[in-house]
Amino acid sequence: MKVYASVLVLATLLVSSAVYAGTADYVYTPTVEYGERELDFKFGTGTPLGGERQTVSTLGLGYGATEYWFTELYLKREVEGMSSDVTLAEWENKFQLLETGKYPIELGLITEIEAPVSQSGPWEAKIGPLLQTEFGKLQLNANMLFERKYSSDSSGVQYPTEALYQWQIKYRLQPEFEFGAQGFGTLGEWDTWVGDKVEGNRSIGPAIFGKVALGNRQAIKYNAAWLIGSGTGAAERTFRMQAEYEF
């Protein structure tokens, strides 16, 4: 029960904290299915206050290489207004650290590297722990992530390490349709946000989920959310979705 309480407290803190994240970001989950292959499409769009509409789409191919390691390669396109159109490549690796169902929580680790393809720009690295627990049909997820950009030229630009969060609440009504809520945000530079007052920016909203079995280990899995932002750093409205074909 102490573990459950800790996860609930963490989720509550994340809801009350702040900030807007990438429009196509999705909530990482810690479990891995060995041998699973998937085609993965993600899409998101939103307009920050005072800014231009941002639209992000990704297409990826993933594989459960072992019982504890899932790896995936993506191509990502980021469009901002009429002036910016960037293509990037991502390599994502997820590691399941505890045996499924053996402990009150599921624990994983995510790592991700992103590099520009269509034009010069900084590389980006991300790493962080993934937590999941359950109460009957209720599933809770809470992730803390650390992200940093690295200059890919001789400019010598130094980027700070940013602390981000994700959380998710899901009620598993039935496999084909589940509902709940999601939230995303950033907490600022990782070594300064603790104890500092964070501005009230947030991105939170209702979400739906589901998995439709097609037979022969094939399935369509989906989730989507309508996120409402508040504060100067948040988009007023963001729509994000993810669809996977597992085979």
Image (spheres, rainbow, N blue to C red):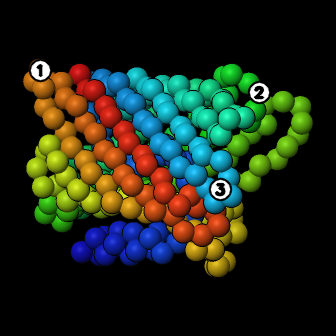
Q: Looking at the image, do the residues carrying marks 3 and 2 touch, with CB atoms under 8 Å apart?
A: no
Q: Quadrant of residue 233?
A: bottom right
User: Is 94 located above or below residue 135 in the figure?
Assistant: above
Earlier sequence position, callout 2 versus callout 1: 2
Which amino acid lies under the numbered mark 2 shown in the image of this protein?
A: Ser
Q: Which residue is mark 3?
A: 162
Label 3 secondary element: strand
Q: Quadrant of residue 55?
A: top right
Q: Position of residue 78 (x, y in %)?
A: 60, 35
Q: Position of residue 159 (x, y in %)?
A: 77, 49
User: Is 134 located above or below residue 178 in the figure?
Assistant: below
Which amino acid lies under the numbered mark 3 shown in the image of this protein?
A: Glu
Q: Which residue is mark 1?
A: 216
- The reply, left or right, for residue 56 in relation to residue 115 is left
User: Is 17 located above or below residue 224 in the figure?
Assistant: below
Q: Which residue is mark 2?
A: 120
Which amino acid lies under the numbered mark 1 shown in the image of this protein?
A: Asn
